[in-house]
Image: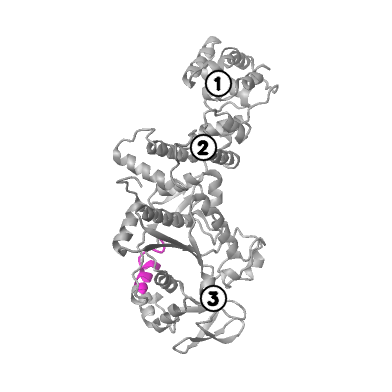
């Protein structure tokens, strides 16, 4: 880490050290229920924890980053974007881990969504230790924690009711656990008795099954969310875990869990912060896995390089709401990152030392596996899109056309090329896209347009390799228009029609200089 550099992740890391004291290992935690596609809003928590874990390591501290898959939660709703809806409906109220994979790829519905995330995270430099709650509950790792909750259920009820008005306080007999029936696998059960030690007796309201289960060997007993969370904080000795603003609302799950953690499990709750929601540009409301309205990490990585993905989160405070864009804003986000990169490498001056340190630290945290040994090759995203389209989408030809790319720079450049190509194919507005005409292919032009194209060919294109800048080429274009007595706008329209069949296109001087002279002359020679 740069000396004196401070970033919000560094601030949180120092707060953890200060509040939790000196420890051999600091545990950072995150987790999600794989109830549907794990979307980019969920990813905000994952990458935020990774950034803080990196800041702790940069401060010289050993760090454990655990990610819990809450796949023992109840399957409550079939998301709208899932296949085989009728088949999935049959498994409502089952543990998610027992729902079959509707794609037939993995061992369960839960595992399918888990693997989608686990396979994508290393691409952005994140490799946590995964904890699967089905395995841990069924291995009875939490038997003591469950029994303690049963012993203190009166205290737990009082803590939960403390944050509820009279209308919403818990009524009647209440248990801090739920049980999946060992006959029909659903959680629509009532507890009939607890023997004060390890044995629970229950009946299923759906299939009528009556049974007894021992907490030390039980396969279907689970704590309710607001007790499960603090119990696991204590079990794993969690030092840091953020949460969304819904959990951090007044009287929300974090408020109750913090008290339960201390008063029932005798452990101080982790350091935390609230992170805000992420929107999708053009779509109202927050993303929801259960509703199927999502953008996931693999989708984001089709348009943004791994470093750009990290940059969007490293460069934004977690409590700031922002929108993921797939329109022309993509160009600006790449430009912003490139500016940060130039400042970090001192290729562009920062306005102050503080700004340099801030941008340098954001850049460091944006890298997948450390800052590269030398500055990457920069080509503006907008220009890169033009180069790709000139090369008919061929990435190899695009890179070859940039004759000053060093071997060590090629991998990152190729990644950017692929993202630009994907953006052009999937999201770029129609007016941004073009295809260069093939040699011998012509379009009908008016007499004035034909005169303009011939003037472009004979007095600009023929000496295109002699211009040392876009500015000198642009001046030659305006001079050509003046020679034949038409205004620049009309000259430009004629040129674009001849080259790409549109009246508008990329900045003409830069565009012409980006096309090989032999190809340019082959197109224009037909006129």
Q: Quick one: SS at disc 1?
A: helix
* Residue density around tag 2, few if under 14, some if 14–19, many if 20 or more, within 10 Å: some
| Residue depicted at 48% across the width and 57% down the height | 42
Q: Which residue is mark 2?
A: 408
Please tell me whether residue 311 belongs to the stretch shown in magenta: no
Q: Please state which of residues 238 and 150 is positioned toward the viewer in this rendering.
A: 238
Mark 2 to mark 1: distance in Å? 39 Å
* Residue density around tag 3, few if under 14, some if 14–19, many if 20 or more, within 10 Å: some
**Location of residue 385 in the rendering, given as x and y in whole percent from the top left corner:** 55, 34
**Location of residue 204 in the rendering, given as x and y in whole percent from the top left corner:** 57, 83
Mark 1 to mark 3: distance in Å? 71 Å
Mark 3 to mark 2: distance in Å? 49 Å
| Residue depicted at 32% across the width and 48% down the height | 6
> Residue 138 got which mark?
3
> Residue 492 got which mark?
1
Q: Quick one: SS at disc 2?
A: helix
Mark 3 or mark 1, which is nearer the start of the sequence? 3
Mark 2 or mark 3, which is nearer the start of the sequence? 3
Q: Write down the region rendered in magenta.
A: 243-261
> Residue 314 got which mark?
none
Q: Quick one: which residue is furthest to the right in this view?
A: 440
Vertical arrangement, residue 246 with respect to residue 72, above or below: above
Q: Please state which of residues 250 and 133 is positioned toward the viewer in this rendering.
A: 133
**Location of residue 270 in the rendering, given as x and y in whole percent from the top left corner:** 36, 65
Q: Please state which of residues 325 and 391 is positioned toward the viewer in this rendering.
A: 391
Q: Which numbered mark, 3 or 2, is in the foreground of this view?
A: 2
**Location of residue 382 in the rendering, given as x and y in whole percent from the top left corner:** 51, 33
């Amino acid at each position: 880490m740069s000396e004196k550099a401070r970033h919000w992740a560094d601030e949180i890391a120092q707060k953890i050290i200060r509040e939790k004291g000196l420890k051999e290992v600091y545990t950072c935690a995150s987790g999600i229920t794989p109830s549907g596609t794990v979307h980019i809003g969920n990813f905000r928590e994952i990458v935020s924890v990774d950034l803080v874990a990196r800041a702790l390591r940069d401060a010289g501290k050993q760090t454990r980053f655990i990610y819990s898959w809450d796949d023992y939660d109840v399957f409550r709703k079939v998301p709208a974007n899932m296949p085989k809806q009728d088949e999935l409906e049959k498994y409502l109220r089952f543990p998610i881990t027992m729902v079959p994979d509707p794609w037939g790829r993995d061992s369960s519905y839960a595992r399918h969504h888990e693997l989608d995330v686990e396979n994508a995270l290393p691409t952005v430099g994140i490799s946590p230790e995964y904890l699967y709650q089905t395995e841990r509950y069924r291995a009875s790792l939490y038997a003591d924690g469950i029994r303690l909750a049963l012993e203190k259920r009166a205290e737990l009820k009082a803590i939960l009711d403390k944050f509820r008005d009279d209308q919403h306080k818990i009524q009647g007999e209440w248990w801090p656990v739920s049980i999946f029936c060992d006959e029909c696998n659903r959680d629509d059960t009532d507890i009939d008795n607890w023997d004060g030690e390890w044995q629970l007796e229950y009946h299923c309201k759906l299939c009528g099954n009556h049974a007894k289960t021992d907490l030390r060997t039980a396969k279907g007993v689970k704590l309710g969310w607001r007790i499960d969370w603090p119990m696991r904080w204590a079990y794993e000795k969690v030092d840091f875990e953020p949460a969304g603003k819904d959990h951090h609302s007044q009287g929300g799950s974090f408020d109750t869990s913090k008290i339960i953690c201390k008063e029932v499990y005798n452990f101080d709750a982790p350091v935390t912060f609230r992170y805000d929601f992420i929107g999708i540009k053009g779509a109202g409301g927050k993303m929801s896995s259960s509703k199927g309205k999502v953008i996931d990490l693999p989708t984001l990585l089709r348009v943004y390089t791994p470093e750009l993905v990290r940059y969007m989160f490293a460069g934004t405070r977690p409590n700031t709401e922002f929108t993921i864009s797939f329109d022309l804003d993509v160009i600006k986000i790449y430009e912003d990152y490139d500016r940060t990169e130039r400042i970090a490498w001192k290729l562009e001056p920062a306005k102050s030392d503080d700004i340099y340190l801030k941008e340098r630290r954001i850049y460091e945290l944006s890298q997948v596996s450390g800052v590269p040994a030398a500055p990457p090759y920069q080509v503006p995203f907008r220009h890169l899109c033009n180069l790709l389209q000139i090369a008919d989408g061929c990435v190899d030809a695009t890179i070859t056309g940039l004759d000053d790319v060093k071997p060590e720079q090629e991998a990152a450049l190729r990644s950017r090329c692929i993202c630009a190509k994907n953006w052009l194919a999937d999201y770029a507005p129609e007016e941004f896209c073009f295809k260069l005409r093939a040699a011998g292919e012509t379009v009908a032009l008016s007499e004035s347009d034909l005169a303009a194209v011939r003037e472009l060919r004979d007095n600009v294109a023929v000496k295109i390799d002699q211009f040392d800048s876009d500015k000198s080429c642009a001046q030659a274009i305006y001079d050509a228009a003046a020679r034949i007595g038409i205004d620049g706008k009309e000259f430009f329209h004629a040129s674009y029609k001849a080259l790409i069949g549109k009246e508008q296109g990329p900045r003409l001087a830069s565009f012409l200089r980006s096309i090989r002279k032999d190809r340019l002359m082959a197109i224009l020679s037909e006129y």
